Image (cartoon, rainbow, N blue to C red):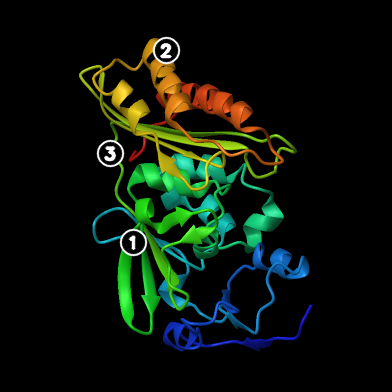
Amino acid sequence: MKSFELVEPQTLAEAVGLLDPSDSSVRALAGGTALMLMMKARLFQPTRLVSLHRLNGTLRGVRISNEGGLSIGALTSLRELERSSLVSTSTPVITRALKMLANVRIRNVATVGGHLAHGDPHMDLPPILLTMGARVRAVSSRGERWIDISELFVGYYQTALAKDELIAELRIPAQNADVCSAYAKCTALSADDWPAVGVAVWYRLGDGLIREARIAISAATERPIRAVAAEAALVGSPAEPAAFARAADAAAEEVQTLADIRGSASYKREMVRVHVRRALQQALQSPSEGK
């Protein structure tokens, strides 16, 4: 491993000022669970790491936003998120998913901002956040901007963040009590491995019918995506196995899966079919959001 400069700013403004928009070898360091592995494997050799561990304030913790949803500081660890009573009350699907995300050692260190900024399509939270309409606040020396989760991931390990931008906050809108949601995944290696397929579902019921539906697929694809044909197959239908099966078939037909060490493209396509159906059924049986 080559030598590099390690700087430890005290404020967010100082941190973004130390990033270089023209130099990809300058990188922010939060939990470091992915970055350190890349450095050890010599996939990434930095010239400067900007450590964020001295930053505090609103960059850490979970609170209720002005709009009534959740405001989550980017330096909040995944373990803190998992144990948050605000999260378990308003978005229990996130709490359930976090219990099966990697292992507790990783969750103790990994941060929300790092989890999203890394752009790994195998991450568990992005598809869930995609169905919830979440967004992030990105900060640079030029100012700040809000980026919808639907626009944050643009390719394989690629995000819409500029090289000198940091995620400062994750904002999740308030979830209504008539919404059913769930996350289902398939791990091909070990139970705590990154998923071969991840599926998040969200649908709103009214008068016994599905009035609105969102289905997001990850891990099998180059980035988290919405399965729009599958969503359309659900809207106007009763929440029953036949409708769930039609949506699962539609999702398997429209998704473009990628082969890797966790499975072939055809295998992952079938796992999309299986896990969309399972997630839709699971959502119906799980506690509603917003309660």
Q: Amino acid at mark 3?
A: Asn
Q: Is residue 158 visible?
A: yes
On the image, numbered disc 2 is attached to which residue? 241
Horizontally, residue 64 falls left or right of residue 102, namely left
In this view, the mark in front (1 or 2): 1
Nearer-the-camera pick, 201 or 83: 201
Q: Amino acid at mark 1?
A: Ile
Q: Is residue 142 above or below residue 89?
A: below
Spatial CA span between label 1 and label 2: 35 Å
Spatial CA span between label 3 and label 1: 22 Å
Q: Amino acid at mark 2?
A: Pro
Horizontally, residue 88 falls left or right of residue 148, namely right
Instruction: Tell me if mark 1 has few (under 14), some (14-19) or many (20+) residues whose alpha carbon lies within 10 angstroms of its own.
Output: some
Residue 176 numbered mark, or none: 3
Q: Residue at x 72, y 41 (%)?
A: 261
Residue 147 numbered mark, or none: 1
Q: Residue at x 39, y 46 (%)?
A: 130
Q: Give residue 240's quadrant in the image.
A: top left
The residue tagged with tag 1: helix, strand or loop?
strand
Q: Residue furthest top?
A: 242
